[in-house]
Image (cartoon, rainbow, N blue to C red):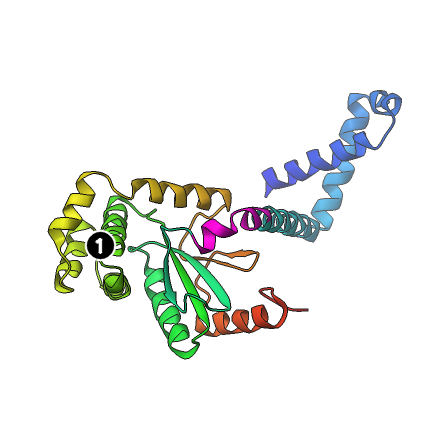
Amino acid sequence: MRSLSRFLLSTLLATSALSLPAAAQSSFDDTQKSDIEAIVRAYLVEHPEVIVEAMTALRDKQDAEQKVAQAGVIESAREALTNAPEGMVLGNPDGDVTITEFFDYNCGYCRQALADMTELIEEDDEIRFVLKEFPILGPGSLEASRVAMAVRDLSPDDYQAFHTTLLGKRGGADKASALAVAEDLGIDTAKIEEKLAVSANMGALQEVQVLANDLQINGTPTYVIGNEVLQARIGVDGLRTIVASMRECGAVSCG
C-alpha cells in the first residue's frame, strides 16, 4: 500500500505540475514540494478509498482501451478467425452465429467448456463453432495439437470424435495419448507419423499464435464472438444469452 500511495502521489504531483505554467512549476522550492506531498499524503490517509477508486478507474480505462484494440484486430482478421483453413468448424458450417474458441488439450476449463459447446450444438442447429488449436500449456499440448491437425487433414469426418474424446479424457494429453485416440477411431497412425516427421501444420499453429498475440489472448478457453474477446469459460447459459443477443442486435450484449 505504501508503494501504491507513493505512485499515486507522484502521479498527482506530476499532473498538478503539468497544469501549471512553466514559471509556476519552477517556483516551487524543496520545502514547498515537501509541503504539497504532505498535504496529498494526509488526504490519502484520511480518504484511503480514493486509492481504490483510482485503481478501479485505471483498470476500467485499460479494459476499455483493450476492447477497442481487440475489436480493431477482430475486424481486420475476421477471415482468419472464422474461415481460415487451420480452424475446424463444428455445428452448422452455414450457421448464423459463429463462435471461435481458442483451446488447449491440457486445459481443465477447456474440458468443462467442451460440454457447453456440445450441448449448444445439439440444441441449436444454427450455431457455427470454429476451433483454434492454441497449445500454450507445454510440450504435451503442442504434440496433441499437431496430432489433432493431422487427423483433421487425413480424416476430417473423424475430427469431432477425436477432439471430444481427447479433450474429455482425464490425465495429460500428449503425442502418445492423441495417437491412441486416433488409433481407437481407426485412423491410420502411420500416416499421422509421416505428417509429424515433416513438421506439417507447424506453420498453421504459428499463425494461430500470432493471431492470439494480436488479440492479447493469453489463456484458454478464450472465445471470440462478434467484436469481443471473452477470456474465460462462459458456461452454456452464458453462451445461450450471448447467441440470443447476437441474433437480436449483432453484439455480445444489447442495450
Give 121 or 216, whichever is nearer the viewer.
Answer: 121
**Residue count near mark 1 (Cα–Cα under 10 Å), binned few <14, some 14–19, many ≥20:** some
**Rendered residue at 23%/65% (across/down):** 165
Q: Quadrant of the C terminus?
A: bottom right
**Rendered residue at 26%/65% (across/down):** 168
Magenta residue check for 136: no
Residue type beneath disc 1: Leu
Q: Main secondary structure of the magenta part?
A: helix
Residue 219: where, in percent of width, then height?
42, 51
Stretch of the chain drawn in magenta:
72-83
* Above or below, comparing residue 205 to residue 16 in the picture: below
Residue 65: where, in percent of width, then height?
63, 47
**Rendered residue at 60%/64% (across/down):** 251
Circle 1 SS class = helix
* Above or below, comparing residue 106 to residue 251 in the picture: above
* Above or below, comparing residue 206 to residue 230 in the picture: above
Give 213 or 36, whichever is nearer the viewer.
Answer: 213
Q: Quadrant of residue 31?
A: top right
Residue linked to disc 1? 154
Q: Quadrant of the N terminus?
A: top right
Identify the residue at the far bottom of this view.
123
Q: Is residue 82 left or right of residue 8?
A: left
Q: Quadrant of residue 148?
A: bottom left
Q: Is residue 87 left or right of residue 217?
A: left
Magenta residue check for 73: yes
Residue 231: where, in percent of width, then height?
47, 56
